[in-house]
C-alpha cells in the first residue's frame, strides 16, 4: 500500500509514473508484490516541479519525495486503524514521525555525464532558521547554485532523518547547551551517551543508484566518512569536490572540531577572511 491516501489516487499516480518503488540496487520493482524481502525498498513520488528561490540561485528543480517502504507500511497500518475509528485528526502525528527524504534534480538525468551531487543532512537551525552556529544553510544554497551552473546537471539528496548527525533535534538542542559550556560538537554527543556521527547513508546510496546508475559522479563534501559510506554501499566512482562556504567567527570552533575529526579542511580554510 502507499499510505493513507485513497487507493484510487494511488492507482492514478502509478499509471502516470509518478509513484515507483525501487530496491537496494536502485532498480524499479513491482510495488504490489511482497516487499518483505526487500528490506531497503524505497517508494518515490515525483517528479514535482518546484521553483527554488534562495540567496544563491533562482531556478526550478524536479522534486522527488522518498520514504523507506517498511516505514511507509507501518504508517499505512496505523492510518487504516485511525480511519476506521474516524481518528483522522491524528494523521498529522503519523506524518510527523515518518522520515521523508527528498531529491532535487536539475537537468535530464538520463543524459548526465559525471553529475554534481550533494548529500545534505537536514539541519532545521541552519537550513530554515539561518543559524550561524554551523555552515549548513550556506552549503545547501551553494550546492543548488553550483548544480544550476554546471553543464552536467546533478542533484541534492536531502536526508530528513539526519538532524544533529543523526541524534535528532531534541538531543541536538542539548548538545548546543553543552557546547556553550565549552565542549565541542563531538564531545557534546559523547556526553549524552550518543555516537559522534550516527548517520546512515544507505538510502542516499540507493537514490543515487536510481537517478545516476553506476556512472561516475562528483560529490560536494568535506567529509571522508560520507564518501566511504557511499562506497561501502556500492558507489565506487566518486570524485570528491571540496564544499567550503559560510565560515564565520561564530562557527569557526565548530568547523575546527570537524577538521580535527577528519574533515577535509585545512588551517587556511578556517582563517578569517
Image (tube, rainbow, N blue to C red):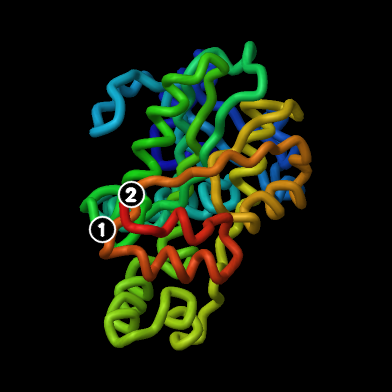
Above or below: residue 77 compared with residue 164: above
From the image, tell me which residue sits under label 1: 132
Residue drawn at x 63%, y 35% is: 208
Tag 2 and tag 1, C-beta contact below 8 Å:
yes
Residue at 29% x, 57% y: name it.
248
Q: Percent x, y for residue 190?
A: 50, 84
For the N terminus, give its image quadrant. Answer: top right
Other residues around mark 1 within 10 Å, as few (<14) / some (14–19) / many (≥20) = some
- Which of the labelled discs sits on residue 246, or is there none? 2
Q: Is residue 268 above or below residue 241?
A: below
Q: Quadrant of residue 113?
A: top right
Mark 2 or mark 1: whose residue is earlier in sequence: 1
Q: Is residue 76 visible?
A: yes
Residue 18 place in picture, x, y as percent: 49, 21
**CA distance for labels 2 and 1:** 8 Å
Element assignment for label 1: loop
Closer-to-camera residue (44/134) = 134
Image-based side of 109 in relation to 187, left or right: right
Decide: few, some or many residues near mark 2? Use Cα within 10 Å; few <14, some 14-19, many ≥20.
some
- Residue 3 is tagged as none
* Residue nearer the viewer, 159 or 59: 59
Residue 136 locus on image (x, y percent): 37, 51
Q: Is residue 77 left or right of residue 133?
A: right
Vertical comparison of 27 with 253: above or below: above
Amino acid at each position: 500500500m502507499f499510505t493513507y491516501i485513497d487507493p484510487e489516487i494511488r492507482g492514478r499516480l502509478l499509471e502516470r509514473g509518478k509513484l515507483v518503488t525501487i530496491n537496494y540496487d536502485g532498480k524499479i520493482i513491482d510495488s504490489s508484490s511482497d516487499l518483505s524481502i526487500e528490506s531497503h525498498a524505497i517508494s518515490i513520488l515525483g517528479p514535482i516541479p518546484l521553483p527554488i528561490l534562495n540567496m544563491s540561485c533562482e531556478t526550478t528543480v524536479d522534486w522527488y519525495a522518498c520514504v523507506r517502504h517498511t516505514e511507509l507500511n507501518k504508517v499505512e497500518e496505523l492510518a487504516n486503524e485511525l480511519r476506521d475509528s474516524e481518528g483522522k485528526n491524528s494523521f498529522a502525528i503519523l506524518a510527523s514521525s515518518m522520515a521523508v527524504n527528498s531529491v532535487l534534480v536539475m537537468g535530464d538525468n538520463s543524459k548526465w555525464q559525471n553529475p554534481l551531487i550533494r548529500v545534505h543532512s537536514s539541519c532545521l537551525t541552519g537550513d530554515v532558521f539561518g543559524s550561524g552556529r554551523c555552515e549548513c544553510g550556506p552549503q545547501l544554497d551553494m550546492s543548488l547554485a553550483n548544480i544550476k551552473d554546471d553543464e552536467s546537471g546533478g542533484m541534492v539528496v536531502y536526508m530528513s532523518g539526519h538532524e544533529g548527525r543523526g541524534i535528532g533535534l531534541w538531543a541536538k538542542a542539548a548538545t548546543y547547551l553543552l557546547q556553550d559550556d565549552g565542549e565541542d560538537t563531538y564531545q557534546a554527543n559523547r556526553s549524552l551517551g550518543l555516537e559522534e556521527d550516527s548517520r546512515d547513508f544507505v538510502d542516499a546510496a540507493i537514490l543515487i543508484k536510481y537517478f545516476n546508475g553506476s556512472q561516475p559522479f562528483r560529490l560536494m563534501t568535506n567529509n571522508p566518512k560520507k564518501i566511504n559510506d557511499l562506497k561501502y554501499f556500492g558507489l565506487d566512482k566518486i570524485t570528491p569536490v571540496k564544499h567550503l562556504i559560510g565560515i564565520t567567527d561564530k562557527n569557526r570552533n565548530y568547523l575546527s572540531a570537524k577538521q580535527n575529526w577528519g574533515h577535509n579542511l585545512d588551517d587556511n580554510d578556517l582563517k578569517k577572511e
